Image (tube, grey):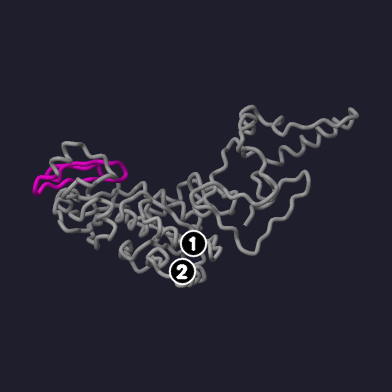
Amino acid sequence: MPTAVAVTGSDLVLPSPDRHTPGAVPLGAATGAPLAASLAELQALLEQHGWLIVLHSSAADPEAIRRVRTARAALEADRVTLVGLDLPPLGLALVALQLRQLSVCDFTPGVLASAARLLAHYVHAGAVLGSLARLDRVPVPLGSHARSWLPGTQYAVQAHPEPRLVKAVPGAELPGPDFATRLYLAHGERPSTWLGETLARSWQVQSVTEVPLPKDSAAWWGTGKLTEFAAGIPDISVLYQLVSSVRRERCRWCGLEFLGDRCGFCGAPLTPPALRAPVASREPRRELGREGAREAGHETPRDPGRDLPAARRAAAALPHAGPRPDTGLPGPPGELGPVAPSGTTRAAAAPGTDPPDRPGSPHPPYR
Protein backbone atom coordinates (compact mmCIF):
# COMPACT_ATOMS: atom_id res chain seq x y z
CA MET A 1 0.00 0.00 0.00
CA PRO A 2 1.24 3.55 -0.72
CA THR A 3 2.38 5.78 2.10
CA ALA A 4 -0.58 7.77 3.45
CA VAL A 5 -0.52 11.57 3.12
CA ALA A 6 -2.57 13.46 5.72
CA VAL A 7 -3.52 17.13 6.01
CA THR A 8 -5.01 19.18 8.82
CA GLY A 9 -8.42 19.70 7.22
CA SER A 10 -10.69 18.45 4.45
CA ASP A 11 -10.48 21.87 2.77
CA LEU A 12 -6.83 21.11 1.92
CA VAL A 13 -7.70 18.03 -0.16
CA LEU A 14 -7.56 18.86 -3.88
CA PRO A 15 -9.37 16.58 -6.34
CA SER A 16 -7.29 13.72 -7.74
CA PRO A 17 -6.26 14.33 -11.38
CA ASP A 18 -6.63 10.62 -12.25
CA ARG A 19 -7.94 7.39 -10.81
CA HIS A 20 -4.47 6.24 -9.71
CA THR A 21 -3.83 9.12 -7.28
CA PRO A 22 -5.03 8.25 -3.75
CA GLY A 23 -6.88 10.78 -1.67
CA ALA A 24 -5.45 12.67 1.29
CA VAL A 25 -6.56 11.97 4.85
CA PRO A 26 -8.03 14.88 6.88
CA LEU A 27 -6.49 13.84 10.20
CA GLY A 28 -9.01 13.87 13.02
CA ALA A 29 -6.39 14.67 15.67
CA ALA A 30 -5.78 18.03 13.96
CA THR A 31 -9.48 18.87 13.61
CA GLY A 32 -10.32 18.61 17.32
CA ALA A 33 -11.43 14.96 17.54
CA PRO A 34 -11.28 13.28 20.99
CA LEU A 35 -8.01 11.60 21.86
CA ALA A 36 -9.51 8.09 21.83
CA ALA A 37 -10.90 8.61 18.33
CA SER A 38 -7.61 10.13 17.16
CA LEU A 39 -5.64 7.15 18.47
CA ALA A 40 -7.97 4.70 16.75
CA GLU A 41 -7.74 6.62 13.48
CA LEU A 42 -3.96 6.81 13.63
CA GLN A 43 -3.63 3.12 14.47
CA ALA A 44 -5.93 2.17 11.56
CA LEU A 45 -3.89 4.28 9.12
CA LEU A 46 -0.64 2.66 10.22
CA GLU A 47 -2.09 -0.83 9.93
CA GLN A 48 -3.39 -0.09 6.43
CA HIS A 49 -0.50 1.95 5.00
CA GLY A 50 2.47 1.36 7.30
CA TRP A 51 3.72 4.98 7.11
CA LEU A 52 1.99 8.36 7.51
CA ILE A 53 3.15 11.84 6.42
CA VAL A 54 1.21 14.73 7.99
CA LEU A 55 1.56 18.02 6.09
CA HIS A 56 0.75 21.25 7.89
CA SER A 57 1.38 24.94 7.48
CA SER A 58 4.07 26.56 9.60
CA ALA A 59 1.35 29.08 10.54
CA ALA A 60 -1.15 26.39 11.59
CA ASP A 61 -2.81 26.45 15.00
CA PRO A 62 -0.17 25.20 17.49
CA GLU A 63 -2.86 23.39 19.46
CA ALA A 64 -3.83 21.31 16.41
CA ILE A 65 -0.22 20.27 15.83
CA ARG A 66 0.19 19.50 19.53
CA ARG A 67 -2.79 17.13 19.41
CA VAL A 68 -1.24 15.22 16.49
CA ARG A 69 2.07 14.89 18.32
CA THR A 70 0.27 13.74 21.46
CA ALA A 71 -1.47 10.98 19.52
CA ARG A 72 1.81 9.96 17.90
CA ALA A 73 3.58 9.81 21.25
CA ALA A 74 0.76 7.85 22.88
CA LEU A 75 1.06 5.16 20.20
CA GLU A 76 4.89 5.33 20.18
CA ALA A 77 4.52 5.57 16.41
CA ASP A 78 7.91 6.23 14.83
CA ARG A 79 6.34 5.71 11.39
CA VAL A 80 4.44 9.02 11.62
CA THR A 81 6.08 12.32 10.74
CA LEU A 82 4.90 15.94 10.71
CA VAL A 83 6.21 18.15 7.89
CA GLY A 84 5.66 21.89 8.21
CA LEU A 85 5.87 24.10 5.10
CA ASP A 86 5.93 27.91 4.90
CA LEU A 87 3.26 28.09 2.20
CA PRO A 88 -0.20 29.67 1.91
CA PRO A 89 -3.07 27.20 2.41
CA LEU A 90 -3.73 26.54 -1.29
CA GLY A 91 0.00 26.07 -1.96
CA LEU A 92 0.16 23.54 0.88
CA ALA A 93 -2.80 21.66 -0.60
CA LEU A 94 -0.98 21.55 -3.95
CA VAL A 95 2.16 20.00 -2.39
CA ALA A 96 -0.06 17.43 -0.66
CA LEU A 97 -1.55 16.54 -4.05
CA GLN A 98 1.91 16.10 -5.57
CA LEU A 99 2.97 13.83 -2.69
CA ARG A 100 -0.18 11.79 -3.22
CA GLN A 101 0.80 11.38 -6.88
CA LEU A 102 4.32 10.26 -5.95
CA SER A 103 3.13 7.90 -3.20
CA VAL A 104 2.18 5.28 -5.80
CA CYS A 105 5.75 5.29 -7.18
CA ASP A 106 8.69 3.27 -5.85
CA PHE A 107 9.96 5.93 -3.43
CA THR A 108 10.62 4.90 0.16
CA PRO A 109 8.73 6.72 2.97
CA GLY A 110 11.83 8.66 4.02
CA VAL A 111 12.44 9.97 0.50
CA LEU A 112 8.77 10.86 0.10
CA ALA A 113 8.66 12.81 3.39
CA SER A 114 11.80 14.81 2.64
CA ALA A 115 10.60 15.45 -0.94
CA ALA A 116 7.89 17.78 0.40
CA ARG A 117 10.39 20.59 0.92
CA LEU A 118 11.84 19.98 -2.56
CA LEU A 119 8.43 20.17 -4.24
CA ALA A 120 7.57 23.35 -2.33
CA HIS A 121 10.42 25.17 -4.12
CA TYR A 122 8.58 24.74 -7.44
CA VAL A 123 5.20 26.03 -6.24
CA HIS A 124 4.17 29.60 -7.10
CA ALA A 125 1.50 30.73 -4.63
CA GLY A 126 -0.23 34.04 -3.98
CA ALA A 127 -3.54 35.86 -4.04
CA VAL A 128 -5.37 38.88 -5.42
CA LEU A 129 -6.42 40.97 -2.40
CA GLY A 130 -8.93 43.73 -2.01
CA SER A 131 -7.14 45.10 1.06
CA LEU A 132 -3.54 45.13 2.30
CA ALA A 133 -4.36 46.53 5.74
CA ARG A 134 -3.74 43.27 7.65
CA LEU A 135 -1.26 41.58 5.35
CA ASP A 136 1.85 40.82 7.42
CA ARG A 137 3.42 37.89 5.54
CA VAL A 138 4.68 39.91 2.56
CA PRO A 139 6.46 43.30 2.77
CA VAL A 140 4.00 46.06 1.75
CA PRO A 141 5.25 49.55 0.73
CA LEU A 142 3.58 52.41 2.54
CA GLY A 143 2.18 53.87 -0.69
CA SER A 144 0.57 50.57 -1.73
CA HIS A 145 -0.83 50.17 1.76
CA ALA A 146 -2.51 53.58 1.55
CA ARG A 147 -3.84 53.11 -2.02
CA SER A 148 -5.39 49.74 -1.09
CA TRP A 149 -8.01 51.65 0.91
CA LEU A 150 -9.45 53.12 -2.29
CA PRO A 151 -12.70 51.40 -3.38
CA GLY A 152 -12.26 48.81 -6.13
CA THR A 153 -8.47 48.62 -5.85
CA GLN A 154 -6.96 45.14 -6.00
CA TYR A 155 -3.39 43.95 -5.60
CA ALA A 156 -1.77 40.75 -6.83
CA VAL A 157 0.55 39.40 -4.15
CA GLN A 158 2.95 36.50 -4.63
CA ALA A 159 4.16 34.98 -1.37
CA HIS A 160 6.22 32.07 -2.75
CA PRO A 161 8.87 31.44 -4.03
CA GLU A 162 9.72 35.13 -3.56
CA PRO A 163 7.54 37.97 -2.26
CA ARG A 164 6.19 40.28 -4.96
CA LEU A 165 3.35 42.81 -5.08
CA VAL A 166 1.80 44.53 -8.11
CA LYS A 167 -1.46 46.32 -8.80
CA ALA A 168 -3.92 43.92 -10.45
CA VAL A 169 -4.50 45.81 -13.68
CA PRO A 170 -4.24 44.67 -17.31
CA GLY A 171 -0.60 44.45 -18.35
CA ALA A 172 0.77 43.97 -14.82
CA GLU A 173 3.00 40.93 -14.44
CA LEU A 174 4.28 38.72 -11.66
CA PRO A 175 7.48 36.64 -12.11
CA GLY A 176 6.22 33.21 -13.08
CA PRO A 177 7.59 29.71 -13.54
CA ASP A 178 9.67 28.75 -16.57
CA PHE A 179 8.14 25.27 -16.71
CA ALA A 180 4.70 23.87 -17.48
CA THR A 181 2.21 24.27 -14.62
CA ARG A 182 -1.45 23.87 -13.72
CA LEU A 183 -3.09 26.87 -12.04
CA TYR A 184 -5.52 26.38 -9.13
CA LEU A 185 -7.88 29.22 -8.19
CA ALA A 186 -9.96 29.60 -5.00
CA HIS A 187 -12.40 32.53 -4.93
CA GLY A 188 -13.35 34.33 -1.72
CA GLU A 189 -15.73 37.20 -1.10
CA ARG A 190 -14.38 39.29 -4.00
CA PRO A 191 -13.61 37.11 -7.06
CA SER A 192 -10.97 38.38 -9.46
CA THR A 193 -10.93 37.98 -13.23
CA TRP A 194 -7.34 39.27 -13.47
CA LEU A 195 -5.91 35.83 -12.69
CA GLY A 196 -7.69 34.05 -15.52
CA GLU A 197 -7.37 36.86 -18.06
CA THR A 198 -3.85 38.15 -17.36
CA LEU A 199 -1.82 35.88 -15.06
CA ALA A 200 -2.78 32.57 -16.67
CA ARG A 201 -1.92 33.94 -20.11
CA SER A 202 1.44 35.45 -19.07
CA TRP A 203 2.46 32.29 -17.21
CA GLN A 204 1.29 30.06 -20.10
CA VAL A 205 -0.35 27.56 -17.77
CA GLN A 206 -1.61 24.29 -19.22
CA SER A 207 -4.99 24.42 -17.47
CA VAL A 208 -6.94 26.30 -14.81
CA THR A 209 -8.86 24.50 -12.05
CA GLU A 210 -11.21 26.23 -9.62
CA VAL A 211 -11.44 24.76 -6.10
CA PRO A 212 -13.13 25.86 -2.83
CA LEU A 213 -11.25 28.41 -0.75
CA PRO A 214 -9.47 26.85 2.27
CA LYS A 215 -10.90 28.06 5.57
CA ASP A 216 -7.51 29.35 6.79
CA SER A 217 -6.90 31.50 3.71
CA ALA A 218 -8.67 34.60 5.09
CA ALA A 219 -6.56 34.51 8.26
CA TRP A 220 -3.34 33.85 6.32
CA TRP A 221 -3.88 36.78 3.91
CA GLY A 222 -5.52 39.12 6.43
CA THR A 223 -8.77 39.56 4.48
CA GLY A 224 -11.66 37.55 3.10
CA LYS A 225 -11.85 39.72 -0.04
CA LEU A 226 -9.45 37.65 -2.09
CA THR A 227 -8.87 35.06 -4.77
CA GLU A 228 -6.04 32.68 -3.89
CA PHE A 229 -3.94 30.95 -6.54
CA ALA A 230 -1.25 28.27 -6.68
CA ALA A 231 0.63 26.89 -9.69
CA GLY A 232 2.67 23.69 -9.71
CA ILE A 233 3.95 20.84 -11.87
CA PRO A 234 1.02 18.60 -12.85
CA ASP A 235 2.85 15.80 -14.71
CA ILE A 236 3.75 12.85 -12.47
CA SER A 237 6.60 11.82 -14.79
CA VAL A 238 8.25 15.23 -14.33
CA LEU A 239 7.74 15.05 -10.56
CA TYR A 240 9.25 11.57 -10.50
CA GLN A 241 12.28 12.69 -12.49
CA LEU A 242 12.72 15.72 -10.23
CA VAL A 243 12.81 13.66 -7.03
CA SER A 244 14.88 10.85 -8.57
CA SER A 245 17.61 13.26 -9.66
CA VAL A 246 18.44 14.32 -6.09
CA ARG A 247 21.15 12.44 -4.21
CA ARG A 248 19.87 10.22 -1.43
CA GLU A 249 21.47 9.84 1.98
CA ARG A 250 21.08 7.19 4.68
CA CYS A 251 19.94 8.42 8.09
CA ARG A 252 22.46 7.54 10.79
CA TRP A 253 19.67 7.39 13.37
CA CYS A 254 16.67 5.50 11.93
CA GLY A 255 18.28 4.05 8.80
CA LEU A 256 15.78 5.54 6.30
CA GLU A 257 16.76 7.16 3.03
CA PHE A 258 16.17 10.90 2.71
CA LEU A 259 16.88 13.94 0.55
CA GLY A 260 18.48 17.18 1.66
CA ASP A 261 20.12 18.00 4.97
CA ARG A 262 17.97 16.08 7.47
CA CYS A 263 15.81 12.98 7.76
CA GLY A 264 12.15 13.46 6.98
CA PHE A 265 10.99 11.17 9.80
CA CYS A 266 13.29 11.43 12.82
CA GLY A 267 14.79 14.85 11.98
CA ALA A 268 18.43 13.73 12.38
CA PRO A 269 20.75 16.05 10.44
CA LEU A 270 23.07 14.90 7.70
CA THR A 271 26.51 13.94 9.05
CA PRO A 272 29.09 16.54 7.92
CA PRO A 273 31.60 15.12 5.40
CA ALA A 274 34.51 15.98 7.71
CA LEU A 275 33.12 13.59 10.36
CA ARG A 276 32.56 10.63 8.04
CA ALA A 277 35.91 8.96 8.83
CA PRO A 278 35.72 5.23 7.92
CA VAL A 279 36.35 2.93 10.86
CA ALA A 280 38.16 0.35 8.74
CA SER A 281 40.97 2.81 7.98
CA ARG A 282 41.46 3.66 11.66
CA GLU A 283 41.53 0.20 13.21
CA PRO A 284 44.77 -1.12 11.56
CA ARG A 285 46.64 2.05 12.49
CA ARG A 286 45.42 1.79 16.05
CA GLU A 287 46.70 -1.78 16.29
CA LEU A 288 50.06 -0.82 14.75
CA GLY A 289 50.42 1.93 17.30
CA ARG A 290 49.78 -0.48 20.17
CA GLU A 291 52.26 -3.00 18.80
CA GLY A 292 54.92 -0.30 18.47
CA ALA A 293 54.31 0.76 22.05
CA ARG A 294 54.58 -2.83 23.32
CA GLU A 295 57.91 -3.30 21.48
CA ALA A 296 59.24 -0.20 23.18
CA GLY A 297 58.19 -1.64 26.53
CA HIS A 298 55.54 0.88 27.45
CA GLU A 299 51.95 1.75 26.50
CA THR A 300 51.25 5.32 25.38
CA PRO A 301 47.81 6.89 25.01
CA ARG A 302 46.67 7.28 21.43
CA ASP A 303 45.16 10.52 20.12
CA PRO A 304 41.98 9.51 18.24
CA GLY A 305 42.43 12.35 15.74
CA ARG A 306 46.15 11.76 15.15
CA ASP A 307 45.69 9.62 12.03
CA LEU A 308 43.12 11.93 10.44
CA PRO A 309 44.01 14.56 7.81
CA ALA A 310 44.41 18.13 8.99
CA ALA A 311 40.89 19.16 7.94
CA ARG A 312 39.34 16.20 9.74
CA ARG A 313 41.47 16.73 12.85
CA ALA A 314 40.12 20.28 13.08
CA ALA A 315 36.55 19.03 12.69
CA ALA A 316 37.08 16.23 15.21
CA ALA A 317 38.14 18.79 17.79
CA LEU A 318 34.76 20.53 17.68
CA PRO A 319 32.47 20.00 20.69
CA HIS A 320 29.77 18.26 18.65
CA ALA A 321 32.27 15.72 17.30
CA GLY A 322 32.91 14.05 20.66
CA PRO A 323 31.64 10.54 21.46
CA ARG A 324 28.10 10.20 22.71
CA PRO A 325 27.63 9.37 26.38
CA ASP A 326 27.04 5.72 27.20
CA THR A 327 24.21 6.45 29.64
CA GLY A 328 20.82 6.80 27.94
CA LEU A 329 19.85 7.06 24.32
CA PRO A 330 20.18 10.67 23.10
CA GLY A 331 17.76 12.10 20.57
CA PRO A 332 19.01 13.74 17.38
CA PRO A 333 18.52 17.47 17.01
CA GLY A 334 15.73 18.65 14.76
CA GLU A 335 12.19 19.95 14.80
CA LEU A 336 10.37 16.64 14.94
CA GLY A 337 12.12 14.70 17.66
CA PRO A 338 12.23 10.91 17.26
CA VAL A 339 9.93 8.45 18.96
CA ALA A 340 11.82 5.33 20.00
CA PRO A 341 10.30 2.09 18.68
CA SER A 342 8.45 0.16 21.34
CA GLY A 343 9.93 -3.00 22.78
CA THR A 344 13.57 -2.05 22.20
CA THR A 345 16.29 -1.55 24.77
CA ARG A 346 19.84 -0.41 24.39
CA ALA A 347 22.56 -2.91 25.06
CA ALA A 348 25.51 -1.80 27.15
CA ALA A 349 28.61 -1.21 25.08
CA ALA A 350 31.74 -3.14 25.99
CA PRO A 351 34.74 -1.10 27.10
CA GLY A 352 36.75 0.17 24.16
CA THR A 353 33.99 -0.34 21.58
CA ASP A 354 31.61 2.09 19.93
CA PRO A 355 27.93 2.07 20.90
CA PRO A 356 25.70 0.74 18.11
CA ASP A 357 24.15 4.14 17.40
CA ARG A 358 27.39 6.12 17.21
CA PRO A 359 28.17 7.57 13.72
CA GLY A 360 30.92 5.61 12.01
CA SER A 361 30.22 2.39 13.93
CA PRO A 362 30.27 -0.91 12.00
CA HIS A 363 27.00 -1.86 13.69
CA PRO A 364 23.66 -1.03 12.03
CA PRO A 365 21.87 2.13 13.26
CA TYR A 366 19.50 1.92 16.18
CA ARG A 367 15.93 1.15 15.14
Comparing 6 with 311, the one in front is 6
Comparing 214 with 246, the one in front is 214
Q: Give SS at disc 1.
A: helix
Residue 162 is covered by the magenta coloring: yes
Q: Residues within 10 Å of mark 2 (few under 14, many from 20)?
A: some
Q: Give SS at disc 2.
A: helix
Q: Quadrant of the C terminus?
A: bottom right
Judge whether residue 344 can be spotted in this image.
yes
Q: Give the range drawn in magenta.
A: 149-176
Residue 212 is covered by the magenta coloring: no
Q: Can you say whether 173 is above or below 192 in the image?
A: above
Q: Which badge, 1 or 2, is on the more N-terminal residue?
A: 2
- The three-letter amino acid code for the residue at tag 2 is Leu
Residue 157 relative to residue 88: left or right: left
* Label 1–label 2 contact, CB within 8 A: yes
- The three-letter amino acid code for the residue at tag 1 is Thr
| Quarter-of-image position of residue 101 | bottom left
Residue 153 relative to residue 237: left or right: left
| Quarter-of-image position of residue 61 | bottom left
Residue 33 relative to residue 171: left or right: right
Residue 205 relative to residue 348: left or right: left
Q: Where in the figure is residue 342, as x and y percent of width and height?
A: 61, 63
Question: On the image, numbered disc 1 is attached to which residue?
Answer: 70
Q: Where in the figure is residue 355, as x and y percent of width and height?
A: 70, 48
Judge whether residue 177 can be spotted in this image.
no
Question: On the image, numbered disc 2 is attached to which residue?
Answer: 35
Comparing 145 with 234, the one in front is 145
Which residue lies at the image location 11% right of the left edge and 46% below the top edge? 153
Q: What is the total number of numbered labels drawn onto the structure image?
A: 2
Q: Where in the figure is residue 250, as x and y percent of width and height?
A: 57, 49
How far is the residue under mark 1 from the one under mark 2?
A: 9 Å
